[in-house]
Amino acid sequence: MSRRTQIGVLIGLVILLVVVYISNRPQMTGLQGVMASDSSFQPLSVEEPELRLDLLAKLQKLDYPAGAHRDIFTNVALPPQQTAEEKRRQEHQYPTVQHWPPPPPVEVPAQFFGYASMRSSPHRLAFFLNGDEVLVVQEGSVFLSRFRLDKIGNDSADVEEVSSGRHASVPMVAPPAGTPTPGGDQPPPNQ
C-alpha cells in the first residue's frame, strides 16, 4: 500500500469514528428517567405500627448496675470489679520485667554411634547415622549444614548449632543391626 492510500484510509477511519461518536451520544443532558418535576408520582401509604408503651415502661423499671458496662457484641465476660484496696495495692507495685521462655533444646537428627582416634592428629572422628547414611565427622567440622562437632567424649558428642550458637550433647547409642560400618566388616573402634 502506498503512503497516500494509508493516509486516506486513516482519514476515513477518523471520520467514521466521529460519526459513530455523535450518533451514540446522549441527546439529553441532566437526569435521565423519572424527572423531579413529575407530578404523577404518588408515595405508597404505609401505616406505622403503634408503639408498645407497656414494653417501654417495663424496660425503664429495670435497674442495671451503675459500674458494670458490657460490650453487647462480644461474649467475653467482664473481669470482676476491683476493690479500692486492690486498686491502691496495684498502683504501688513495681513494674516487672517480662521473661521470655527459653528456646527449645537443640535436636540433632543424626545418631552418634561411635568414634575413632587418628594417630597423625589429636582430633577424633565421630560416626553419625542419618537415616541410612553414615557420616564421618572430625572434631571442629560442620555436618548436616547446621551443626558443628565441638568435642567427642567417651559416651557422648558435644554439638553446636551454627545458626544460633546453642549447644547440645548427643549420647552414644548402639547402631541398629544391619547398619554398614565405616571400616567395612570391622566394627568402629573404641565402642
Image (tube, rainbow, N blue to C red):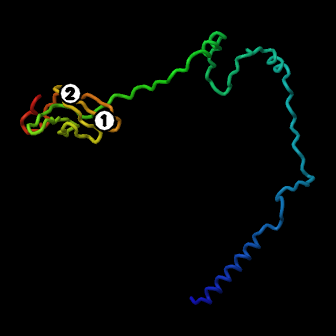
On the image, which quarter does residue 21 sit in? bottom right
Q: From the viewer's perspective, is residue 116 above or below residue 23?
A: above
- Tell me the number on the disc at residue 161: 1
Taking the view exactly as shown, the residue that stands out farthest to the right is: 39
Q: Could you tell me residue 7's position as x and y percent?
A: 64, 86
Identify the residue at image location x=24%, y=30%: 158
Q: Quadrant of the N terminus?
A: bottom right
Position of 45 with respect to 64 (left or right) is: right
Q: Could you tell me residue 102's position as x and y percent?
A: 40, 26
Q: From the viewer's perspective, is residue 93 above or below residue 8?
A: above
Q: Does the CB distance between marks 1 and 2 fall below 8 Å?
A: no
Q: From the viewer's perspective, is residue 16 above or below residue 121?
A: below
Q: Tell me the kind of residue under disc 2.
A: Ser
Q: Could you tell me residue 161's position as x and y percent?
A: 31, 35
Position of 134 with respect to 82 (left or right) is: left
Q: Tell me the kind of residue under disc 1.
A: Glu
Instruction: Name the residue that disc number 2 marks.
Output: 156
Q: For mark 2, give the secondary structure.
A: strand
